[in-house]
Image (cartoon, rainbow, N blue to C red):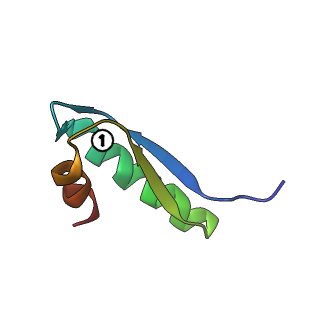
């Protein structure tokens, strides 16, 4: 089975990213690097554009 990457579900409440999500993204990055793949995240909700910008910065 081919590895397609690592997906991290990002928790948010009131448009603010939960701090544990950044730790999970860091660990996801480590796993993706070791596997030679990409890391992606899923952020769901409304009014989350600021949170999305924070994740990609």
Q: Image quarter for residue 14?
A: top left
Q: Residue furthest front?
A: 46
Q: Residue at x 22, y 52 (%)?
A: 49
Q: Residue furthest bottom?
A: 36
Would residue 28 appear left or right of 15 to someone viewing this image?
Answer: right
Front residue of 13/34: it is: 13
Secondary structure state at the residue bearing disc 1: helix
Front residue of 57/35: it is: 57
Would residue 24 appear left or right of 47 to someone viewing this image?
Answer: right
Q: Residue at x 20, y 49 (%)?
A: 51
Q: Image quarter for residue 57?
A: bottom left
Q: Residue at x 37, y 51 (%)?
A: 25
Would residue 36 appear left or right of 7 to someone viewing this image?
Answer: right
Provide residue 13's location: percent of width, then percent of height: 20, 29
Residue tagged 1: 21
Q: Image quarter for residue 5?
A: bottom right
Q: Is residue 44 above or below residue 49?
A: above
Provide residue 3's location: percent of width, then percent of height: 72, 58
Mark 1, Cα crowd under 10 Å, few <14 / some 14-19 / many 20+, is some
Would residue 55 appear left or right of 9 to someone viewing this image?
Answer: left
Q: Is residue 33 above or below residue 47?
A: below
Q: Residue at x 52, y 56 (%)?
A: 31
Q: Residue furthest right?
A: 1
Count of numbered circles in the view = 1
């Amino acid at each position: 089975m081919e590895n397609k990457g690592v997906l991290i579900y990002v928790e948010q409440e009131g448009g603010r990213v939960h701090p544990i999500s950044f730790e999970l993204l860091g660990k996801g990055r480590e796993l993706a690097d070791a596997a030679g793949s990409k890391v992606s995240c899923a952020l769901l909700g409304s009014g989350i554009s600021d949170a999305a910008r924070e994740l990609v910065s």
